[in-house]
Image (cartoon, coloured by chain):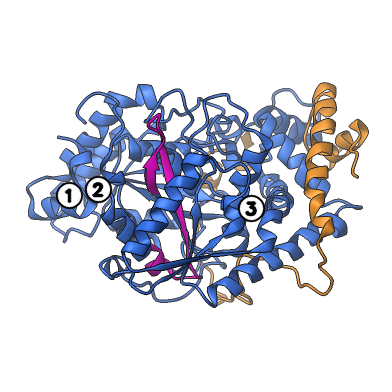
Chain colours: A orange, B blue
Amino acid sequence: MAKISKEQVLHTANLATLAISEEEAEMFSNQLTEIITFTEKIQNINTEGVKRTIYGNDNDNVLREDKAIRTITQEEALKNAPSQENGQFKVPSIMD
Amino acid sequence: MSLYHYSIEELVKLLHKGDLNAEETAKMSLDRIEEVDDQVKAFLTVNKDNVLADAKKLDESTEPKERLFGIPGGIKDNVMTKGVRTTCASKFLENFDEPLYNATLLEKLNKDHSLMMGKVNMDEFAMGSTTETSAYHPTYNPWNLEHVPGGSSGGSAAAVAAGEVMYSIGSDTGGSIRQPSSFCGVIGMKPTYGLISRYGLVSLAPSLDQAGPITRTVEDNAYVLETIAGHDALDATSVNRTIPKYTDSLQKDVKGLKIAVPKEFLGEGVSEEVRESVMNALKMYELLGATWEEVSLPHLAYADAAYTVICNAEASSSLARFDGVRYGKRADETEDMIEMLKTSRGEGFGENVKRRILLGTTMLSAGYTDTHFIKAQQVRTLIKNDFEAAFKHYDVIVGPTTPTEAFKIGEQPSNEVMHMSDVLTVPVNLAGLPAISVPCGYTDAGLPLGLQIIGKHFDESTVYQVAYAYEQATNHHKKRPDLGGAN
């Protein structure tokens, strides 16, 4: 049986690059425990030797000609940017 | 004049002859939106100015009129519309006013001269089944405004049922076209995975997602699918094959057709009224010359669990792109890059979206990948195999679309009902099959019920044929919700 602790939720939130509050972590801890426990009914199914289905269909090795095409301009790419400078996306500092 | 009075093909005929023009049909749609949308609230963005200009341009053009000339449609807000705000009903994308391109399916609708009336409401990032998790407002069921329209394509289904548009586009990851169509008494088709390009459909779970049309009649539905289906080099999962003329298959009768009814579709949680309406539909098929038998697809009962694992794992990965760098929400006054990313996402996503990201991330982290995620993908194979075995002996699989009529706003259905809701719809996505919901009656309280018809891969023609035969033999599709105005 899975028990997802509050600390685990905070750790997972960190992995998912997601800020959550202490209260949210508490709530999600209970909810995730409940949901994951519910999904564990599949543990009773014998899947020995069963191949997994990963994709929606069997398309594979979809190739195209290696040809340059024009998609969007720099100006267009920046149209929705929350912050920009000198034709680039601007973000807070990454390193000190 | 009301859109309710016409089928798509009837309207197309009048428009092609010139008895009506595109500006007039655009106005019919806008007038109806004006008249009823403050009750129904199906729309997030009405594309009023653009669509009137587009309609005028179409009317003035000397080029030949295409097959959807002047037909007003609504587009779910997780479909990219160039220059028209696309929010996925999330605050994260509240200011995403300038999408840079159109989804391929919209390009196809535009090429066939359809009119894009606006963007319709949904559960945030298509995660939900009531449209109540929209960050903007709920949508209300046109048949009874105290009930939900279903979801996640609740706006798409409600807009069609309310006569605001002739068709709408929804998306279906685990039932999100079929369930709201059932709740709103309209026709919703989830086509075979790979039939319609997903380019420009914002991903929830890429191995399960598929867009599809919602309409008032089966014929309208087949007509719209003919436009939006087809291979697209921009989507590597779209399939290259000839698209049949679905409307040609409608007139074929169902004599000798073999129907399977999985007993797992009629388990505890399915209401008496739903059971009865499905049994009546099966009797109707007998009268029409088809036969049906009860079968067992034993792994369907586990489909909800496998789906929960797979869908949320994929979703947590899909939603990683929302970072507040290139577009979307950017948190103010953050110290560094990582804090900016975390805070933007924390502020921009609703509670339900956060829960699912955390659940999916857990499923993909050490200690869970092998035991939960890979296990669920193996169970997915077993579910696929169950369907394949049944389709060796039967032409279609039939059952209810939903275990009950539409929930009340704010209502928390019982665990049995939630379990059955998933068992009825998610197996089709796990197996990549086509399935339609067609109205099959009304509860005593007047809420619509839906019959689900599931077909073999790429056999939409048979699904439409079976749906059409039933629709034409009954009067369910002729009823309309009473919202006042020019019904």
- Numbered disc 2: what chain? B
Earlier sequence position, callout 3 versus callout 1 = 1
On the image, which quarter does residue B2 sit in?
top left
Depth check: give the residue in front, B69 or B369: B369
Residue at image point 31% right, 25% down: B36
Query: Do tag 1 and tag 2 residues touch (Cβ < 8 Å)?
Result: yes
Query: Label 2: how many residues lie within 10 Å, few (<14), some (14-19) or many (20+)?
Result: many
Instruction: Specify whether B306 is left or right of B239.
Output: right
Residue stretch rendered in magenta on the structure: B439-463
Camera-nearest residue between B34 and B1: B1
Q: Is residue B102 visible?
A: no
- For the point 85% across and 40% down, the residue is A12
Q: Secondary structure at mark 3?
A: loop
The part of the image, by quadrant, that contains residue B258 is bottom left
Question: Residue B205: which disc?
Answer: 3
Residue B68 x/y as whole percent: 25, 55
Please give the chain letter of the residue carrying mark 3. Answer: B
Q: Are marks 3 and 1 on the same chain?
A: yes
- Quadrant where the N terminus of chain B sits is top left
B161 relative to B197 in the view: left or right: left
Compared to residue B179, the image places residue B39 above or below, namely above
Residue at position x 70%, y 52% in the image: B314
Residue A74 rendering spot, x and y as whole percentages: 54, 49
Are tags 1 and 2 found on a single chain?
yes
Q: Residues within 10 Å of mark 1 (few under 14, many from 20)?
A: many
Q: Nearer the viewer, residue B25 or B225?
A: B225
> Is B452 a magenta residue?
yes
Which of the marked residues, 2 or 3, is nearer the chain's N terminus?
2
Q: Which mark is residue B108?
A: none
Disc 1 target residue: B11
Q: Residue tagged by mark 2?
A: B71
